[in-house]
């Protein structure tokens, strides 16, 4: 088959498997040209094939749900975590959570979690997929995959799971590339819209001659912070967008609008996210045990893995065959 025939066949498959974005007939405000360009760029975004496998028990996904505002700009849905949650109570976050054995891929995880947390329908016609982003290494020893969707029906009303979500709000997507706030800030305010801090990143590493971490030198990592405009004092105050959530939204906005942020994203000497993930999977004891439990020992770990099993370590079979087969072909 000629290259032209292959491309035509591929386009037909994409139209069959992914709902078409009928923006003109969707019940949303007319989009600005830059919003349309952003959507097209996200649809065209393809991540490189990942060279490492991630144990299922360490997978998670978040949903980056975009929608059109009144004047045609793109906004992202953000939630305030419930105050009674064990981890990160009250933080600003994206809907999402850990992989479940009934999830066939990262998109399924993100959609299920968004439905459970904020009632967003798992409807690929009304909320079509735009793209899957590169994975991120998160605190809690998880590898998080952002899933970007577009809400094509602005009549959808949220149903919050009060045990997990205190409130839901939105923020301008393009503002994650700027140091200028999308809302008024008093001239005498001492707090900037965008700030960052460079912290120590303790991702372990080693050498090819050792199966254990031999280098625990801290490396710099930049953590970004964006005000939401809702940080007023009182019980209804909203925390800034910070850390992993900020990093994900900077990346989504940069891909969508095809421009670099107005600030430096990484600290000098900071490892790439791919390198951090590979190192964590290789040397972090939590990830290593998770890999061993799922039979994913590296070739030079075989002896230690067999010893681990002799000492009582158990390889857990993946009970959901469909999920196992799909995940084995995943790009993660």
Image (tube, helix red, strand yellow):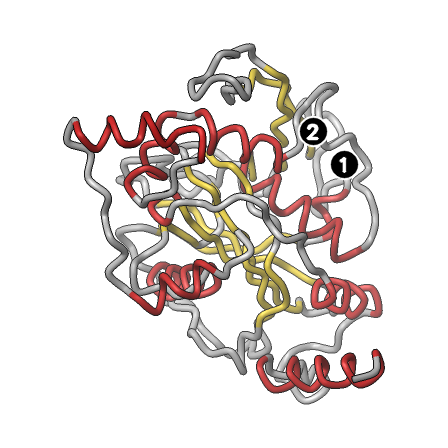
Residue 51 located left or right of residue 236: right
Q: Position of residue 3 (x, y in %)?
A: 83, 78
Q: Nearer the viewer, residue 287 or 93?
A: 287
Q: Residue at x 55, y 10 (%)?
A: 217
Q: Nearer the viewer, residue 15 or 79?
A: 15
Mark 1 or 2: the one toward you: 1
Image mark count: 2
State which tag comes first along the sequence, 1 or 2.
1
Q: Position of residue 91 (x, y in %)?
A: 43, 38
Q: Are marks 1 and 2 in contact (CB under 8 Å)?
A: yes
Whole-number angstrom distance, CA of label 1 to CA of label 2: 8 Å
- Examine the rendered structure and indicate whether residue 152 appears above or below residue 54: below
State which quadrant residue 37 falls in.
bottom right
Crowdedness near tag 1: few (<14), some (14–19) or many (≥20) residues, C-alpha within 10 Å: some
Q: Position of residue 234 (x, y in %)?
A: 42, 36
Toward the bottom, the furthest residue is: 25
State which quadrant residue 309 falls in.
top left
State which quadrant residue 136 falls in.
top right
Q: Residue at x 36, y 39 (%)?
A: 291
Read off the residue under disc 1: 179
Q: Nearer the viewer, residue 19 or 161?
A: 19
Crowdedness near tag 2: few (<14), some (14–19) or many (≥20) residues, C-alpha within 10 Å: few
Q: Position of residue 94 (x, y in %)?
A: 49, 50
Q: Nearer the viewer, residue 215 or 135?
A: 215
Q: Residue at x 56, y 46 (%)?
A: 135
Read off the residue under disc 2: 192
Quarter of the N terminus within the rendering: bottom right
Badge 2 marks a residue whose secondary structure is loop
């Amino acid at each position: 088959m000629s290259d032209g025939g292959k491309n035509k066949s591929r386009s037909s498959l994409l139209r069959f498997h992914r709902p078409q974005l009928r923006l003109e007939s969707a019940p949303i405000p007319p989009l600005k040209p830059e919003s349309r360009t952003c959507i097209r760029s996200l649809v065209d975004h393809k991540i490189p094939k990942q060279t490492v496998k991630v144990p299922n028990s360490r997978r998670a996904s978040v949903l980056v749900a975009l929608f059109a505002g009144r004047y045609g700009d793109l906004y992202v849905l953000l939630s305030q975590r419930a105050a009674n949650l064990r981890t990160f109570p009250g933080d600003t976050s994206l809907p999402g959570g850990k992989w479940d054995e009934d999830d066939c891929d990262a998109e399924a995880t993100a959609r299920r979690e968004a439905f459970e947390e904020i009632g967003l329908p798992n409807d690929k016609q009304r909320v079509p997929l735009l793209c899957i982003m590169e994975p991120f290494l998160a605190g809690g020893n998880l590898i998080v995959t952002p899933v970007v969707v577009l809400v094509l029906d602005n009549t959808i009303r949220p149903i919050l799971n009060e045990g997990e979500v205190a409130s839901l709000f939105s923020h301008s997507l393009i503002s994650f590339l700027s140091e200028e706030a999308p809302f008024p800030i008093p001239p005498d305010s001492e707090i900037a819209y965008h700030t960052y801090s460079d912290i120590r990143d303790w991702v372990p590493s080693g050498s090819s001659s050792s199966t254990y971490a031999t280098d625990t030198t801290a490396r710099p990592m930049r953590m970004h912070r964006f005000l939401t405009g809702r940080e007023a004092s009182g019980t209804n105050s909203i925390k800034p967008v910070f850390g992993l959530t900020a990093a994900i939204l900077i990346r989504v906005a940069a891909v969508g609008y095809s421009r670099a942020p107005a600030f430096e994203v990484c600290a000098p000497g900071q490892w790439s996210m791919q390198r951090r993930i590979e190192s964590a999977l290789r040397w972090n004891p939590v990830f290593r045990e998770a890999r061993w439990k799922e039979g994913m020992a590296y070739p030079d770990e075989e002896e230690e893995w067999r010893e681990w099993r002799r000492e009582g370590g158990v390889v857990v079979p993946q009970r959901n065959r469909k999920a196992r087969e799909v995940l084995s072909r995943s790009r993660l």
